[in-house]
Image: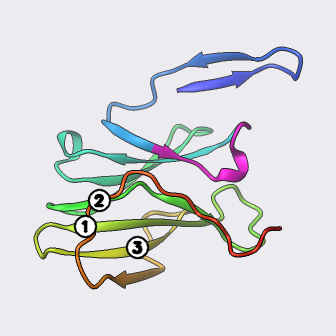
Amino acid sequence: MPRAEGGAARIRVTEEHTDDLTVEFPTINDAFTGREHRYQYALSFPDDLGTHALVKYDRATGARQIKPFGTGRLPSEAVFVPAGAAMEEDGGYLLTVVSDLNTDSSRLLVLDASDLDLPPVAMVHLPRRVPAVIHGSWIPDTVQ
């Protein structure tokens, strides 16, 4: 995983092995794009866990937190949404649409980005199954 080091005049980028999980579609709090960040979120694929999951990495401690979705449930790339005046980098929510192949249904999950072990903050059952989506973004209704 690339990491920038050094001052404004000189930046050195290094790469390091983070995990043995097969992950894809990483995302961060967009307020940290182009800057040093602590938390990353990504999707993990079944060849490692037996089920799709959302993974949160803490780059400062090396810890990871995994939220599995169950057999036949395919989450979309998580989109980070900041919470109001949150001061912490992970102060916000992760939005993901989970497509359930078992019941031919989908739901939008709103997860607490600071702790994936917590139950969803909100769950919206969609009227029909939505195929798993790869990329997404959050655009607030007001520009600050």
Left of 123 or right of it: where is 9?
right
Q: Is residue 29 magenta?
A: yes
> Which x, y percent locates residue 117?
42, 66
Relative image position of residue 7 (x, y in whole percent): 86, 21
Tell me: 21 left or right of 14.
left
Contact flag, marks 2 and 1 (Cβ < 8 Å): yes
Residue carrying label 2: 132
Badge 3 amino acid: Leu
- Looking at marks 2 and 3 on the same chain, the residue that comes earlier in the sequence is marked by 3
Q: Residue at x 66, y 17 (%)?
A: 13
Frontmost residue, 5 versus 134: 134
Residue visible at 39% across and 81% down in the picture: 123
Q: Where, by quadrant of the figure, is residue 98 drawn?
A: bottom left
Residue 94 horizontal side relative to residue 107, left or right: right
Residue at numbered disc 3: 109
Q: Nearer the viewer, mark 1 or mark 3?
A: 1
Q: Residue placed at 89% from the left, 16% from the top?
A: 9
The three-letter code of the residue at mark 1 reads Ser
Q: Quarter-wise, where is residue 96 in the image? A: bottom left
Distance, label 2 to label 1, CA atoms, is: 6 Å
Which residue position is annotated with label 1? Answer: 99
Q: In terms of secondary structure, where does tag 1 sit?
A: strand
Magenta span of residues? 26-35
Query: Disc 2 residue type?
Result: Ala
Question: Crowding at label 1, few (<14), some or many (≥20) Cα neighbours within 10 Å?
Answer: many
Residue 83 point in image, percent of width and height: 67, 71
Within 10 Å of disc 2 (Cα), the crowding (few <14, some 14-19, many 20+) is: some
| Disc nearest the viewer among 2 and 3 | 2
Residue 90 vertical placement versus 128 (above, below):
above
Tag 2's secondary structure?
loop
- Verify CB contact (< 8 Å) between mark 2 and mark 3: no
